[in-house]
Image (tube, rainbow, N blue to C red):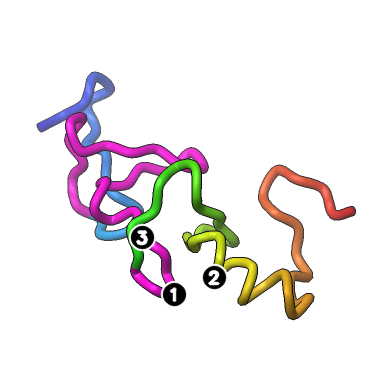
Amino acid sequence: MATLGGAQQKCMACNKTVYLVDKLTADNRIYHKACFRCHHCKGTLKLSNFNSFEGVLYCRPHFDQLFKRTGSLEKSFEGKNNL
């Protein structure tokens, strides 16, 4: 099934076609609702409770655990300046 522009929209996680009823957009990327999961724990994410780094999705607790607490986050987030 084609979109208005003639191209199919693909999920960033599984690379399969995403239809409007199952479409979720986060960080200007398209996902199936079921594919919008934390990379670390595989838990289902919501738009209100996720973070991403270099295109990889994380739940807030794991993002904090993996990056903030250790201070290993050396690169700036997309679209944001380093402080």
Residue visible at 21% across and 26% down?
A: 3
Which class describes the residues within 10 Å of circle 3: few (<14), some (14-19), or many (20+)?
many
Q: Farthest right residue?
A: 83
Front: mark 2 or 3 = 2
Say which quarter of the image contains residue 44: bottom left
Residue located beneath label 1 in the image: 40
Residue located beneath label 3 in the image: 37
Is 31 part of what is drawn in magenta?
yes
Residue visible at 25% across and 47% down?
A: 32
Q: Farthest front residue?
A: 61
Label 2: state its secondary structure: helix
Residue located beneath label 2 in the image: 62
Residue 42 pos. (x, y %): 34, 69
- Give the answer, above or below, for where 10 lies relative to 8: below
Is disc 1 in contact with disc 2, using a CB cutoff of under 8 Å?
yes
Magenta residues, start to end: 16-42
Residue 72 pos. (x, y %): 74, 77
Q: CA distance from mark 1 to mark 2?
A: 7 Å
Amino acid residing under circle 1: His
Label 3: state its secondary structure: loop
Q: CA distance from mark 2 to mark 3?
A: 12 Å
18 and 33: which one is in front?
Answer: 33
Mark earlier in primary sequence (2, 3): 3
Say which quarter of the image contains residue 38: bottom left
Is 13 part of what is drawn in magenta?
no
